[in-house]
């Protein structure tokens, strides 16, 4: 009975959709008038909705594209724009999250990440030689895939993993995970071919994505890989550390100097 349950319930376990309505849209517009609403139609006619915020005086800004965790609605990250001084920030909800339409899946997340990059790399207010992907938890797999498909300046990964398959196999050691899992998010298989700088931020006491899975990815990385272990933190409070933001700011500043 366990095998059928895991197979048919895996989308609900992996993609915990946080939906919003038009009232939330009005609230964000009132609270953050500097945020530009983003609406992008995918080739298969699905609407993706999110926000673009600029924190740079330059005519062409470097850009950070953020990919959230499996239960994340991205509007809350607008308030973090002050940490991205000199950068623009793109926050777009996955399919089925927030006000984005459609259904979440590994394939859809990957295709949409490339679409977001291609769309914003063409904007006249973006320096397309300085685009960084920033992924957290589940979103690290999306960010790694984008880095494999497009020329990024760098990559920030918070609680990264080698693959969802590997984590699931550890949780269910007697289950043939490879046969049952539809969404593998295998970052490890891509890691050695990606040569750009990467910063990994790891929660010392992470029980959802154990640090051992993060270090497997770091060790396989094809470019320069930095990492910071945030002490006395776990999966859900890693962002509350001063060291967390200090590491991100220092990494982004280093990319602008190259």
Image: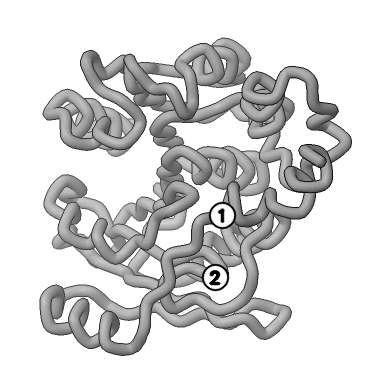
Tag 2 residue? 96
Q: Could you tell whether 209 is left or right of 217 in the image?
A: left
- Residue 60 in percent (x, y) is at 30, 62
- Residue 70 in percent (x, y) is at 49, 50
Residue appearing at x 61%, y 56% in the figure: 12
Q: Secondary structure at mark 1?
A: loop
At label 1, counting other C-alpha atoms closer than 10 Å, the crowd grade (few under 14, some 14-19, many 20 or more) is: many
Q: Earlier in the sequence, mark 1 or mark 2?
A: 1
What's the distance in space between the residues labelled 1 and 2, CA to CA?
A: 9 Å
Tag 1 residue? 15
Quadrant in the picture for the C terminus? top left
Q: Could you tell whether 141 is left or right of 207 in the image?
A: right
Residue appearing at x 14%, y 74% in the figure: 32
Q: In front here: 254 or 104? A: 104
Q: Are marks 1 and 2 in contact (CB under 8 Å)?
A: yes
Residue appearing at x 56%, y 54% in the figure: 15
């Amino acid at each position: 009975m366990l095998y059928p349950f895991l197979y048919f319930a895996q989308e609900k376990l992996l993609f915990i959709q946080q939906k919003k309505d038009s009232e939330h849209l009005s609230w964000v517009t009132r609270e953050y008038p500097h945020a530009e609403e983003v609406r992008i139609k995918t080739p298969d006619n699905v609407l993706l909705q999110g926000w673009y915020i600029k924190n740079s005086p330059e005519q062409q800004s470097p850009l950070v594209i953020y990919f959230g965790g499996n239960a994340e609605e991205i509007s809350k990250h607008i308030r973090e724009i002050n940490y991205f001084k000199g950068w623009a920030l793109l926050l777009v909800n996955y399919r089925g999250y927030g006000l984005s339409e459609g259904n979440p899946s590994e394939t859809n997340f990957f295709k949409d990440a490339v679409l977001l990059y291609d769309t914003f790399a063409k904007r006249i207010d973006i320096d397309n030689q300085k685009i960084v992907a920033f992924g957290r938890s589940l979103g690290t797999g999306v960010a790694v895939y984008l880095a494999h498909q497009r020329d990024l300046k760098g990559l920030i990964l918070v609680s990264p993993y080698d693959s969802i398959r590997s984590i699931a196999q550890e949780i269910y050691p007697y289950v043939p995970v490879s046969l049952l899992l539809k969404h593998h998010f295998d970052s490890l298989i891509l890691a050695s071919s990606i040569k750009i700088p990467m910063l990994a931020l790891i929660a010392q006491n992470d029980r959802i994505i154990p640090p051992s899975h993060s270090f497997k990815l770091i060790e396989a990385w094809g470019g320069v890989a930095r990492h910071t272990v945030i002490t006395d933190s776990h999966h859900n409070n890693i962002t509350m550390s001063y060291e967390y933001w200090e590491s991100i700011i220092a990494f982004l500043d280093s990319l602008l100097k190259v």
